[in-house]
Amino acid sequence: MVSYNEYLKKILSQILDSYHILRDIQDKPGDLERIHKEMLKINGFIKVVVNNIDEIKIPQSDFKPLQIKLGHYLENYFFEKEIETMAPLYSNDMHRVKNMRLKIIEALEYNRTMESLEDLIDKI
């Protein structure tokens, strides 16, 4: 049986894995679809952490601030619509694809969110 902490660690690790994939993309034709896929994964896992994880069951004191940061990301950054609009017109324009990828990474790194996530994974 998986403990609550192991469950949270697995979800946070999946967010981190997709984030690293976004950082490592080389910006070539077809990458916009991959960026979109990884961003949707990240958003889905963040929604699980924000809406379904009970901070009372997580003994680490760093969880609540991370949960707030992830909630801030969900409330303030909407890249799905931009990517869907951009895809038919600019999916082969590597400068635009790179800019979109960098904006997503910047949003994830805002307020040291990814660093906090990595720290919490290490503590769990």
Image: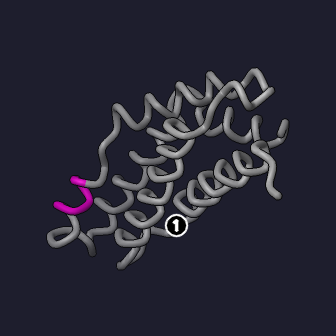
Total label count? Answer: 1
In this view, the residue in front, 64 or 27, is 64
- Residue drawn at x 42%, y 48% as measured from the top left: 104
Q: Is residue 43 above or below residue 117?
A: below
Residue 67: percent from the left, percent from the top? 57, 30
Does 43 appear in magenta? no
- Residue drawn at x 34%, y 32% as measured from the top left: 76
Residue at the limit of the structure toward the bottom, as seen here: 29
Residue 115: percent from the left, percent from the top? 68, 36
> Which residue corresponds to mark 1?
25
- Dot 1 surroundings within 10 Å: few (below 14), some, or many (20 or more)? some
Q: Main secondary structure of the magenta part?
A: helix
- Could you tell whether 51 is left or right of 84 in the image? right
- Could you tell whether 68 is left or right of 36 in the image? right
- Could you tell whether 114 is left or right of 42 in the image? right
Q: Quadrant of the N terminus?
A: bottom right
- Stretch in magenta: 81-85
Tell me the SS state at disc 1.
Answer: loop
Residue 94: percent from the left, percent from the top? 33, 68
Residue at the limit of the structure toward the front, as seen here: 1
